[in-house]
Image (cartoon, rainbow, N blue to C red):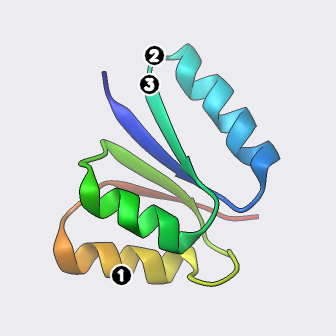
């Protein structure tokens, strides 16, 4: 199965996205901040990372830059 990492500091958004993506048979991992998401992204090869642009601590943009230094991955930025 294809695995996706959802990164957002709002649990309701993660819950909604998880519901739709699992219905399409994706395996979902979640992180509520950029630091945790970065650790997860570097330890597993996700098919896609869906992440919020604005998060406390490390923003989605900073996280993308950090990941890009180590590996290439598909990313989809979520923005209000």
Given residues 15 and 48, the one toward you in this image is 15
Q: Residues within 10 Å of mark 3 (few under 14, many from 20)?
A: some
Write down the residue under mark 2.
25
Q: Quadrant of the C terminus?
A: bottom right
* For the residues bearing labels 1 and 2, Cβ distance under 8 angstroms: no
Q: Residues within 10 Å of mark 2 (few under 14, many from 20)?
A: few
Among numbered discs 1 and 3, the one appearing first in the sequence: 3
Describe the element under mark 3 as helix, strand or loop: loop
Write down the residue under mark 1.
65
Residue drawn at the location 38% of the way across and 66% of the way down = 39
Write down the residue under mark 3.
26
Kindly indicate the quadrant of the structure image that contains residue 18.
top right
- Real-space CA distance between mark 1 and mark 3, rounded to the nearest whole angstrom: 25 Å
Describe the element under mark 2 as helix, strand or loop: loop
* For the residues bearing labels 2 and 3, Cβ distance under 8 angstroms: yes
- Total marks drawn? 3
Residue 43 at x, y percent in the picture: 26, 57
């Amino acid at each position: 199965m294809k695995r996706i990492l959802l990164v957002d500091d709002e649990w309701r958004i993660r819950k909604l996205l998880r519901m739709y993506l699992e219905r399409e048979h994706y395996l979902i991992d979640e992180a509520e901040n950029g630091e945790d998401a970065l650790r997860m992204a570097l330890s597993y090869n996700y098919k896609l990372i869906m992440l919020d642009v604005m998060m406390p601590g490390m923003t989605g943009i900073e996280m993308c830059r950090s990941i890009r230094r180590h590996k290439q991955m598909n990313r989809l930025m979520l923005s209000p």
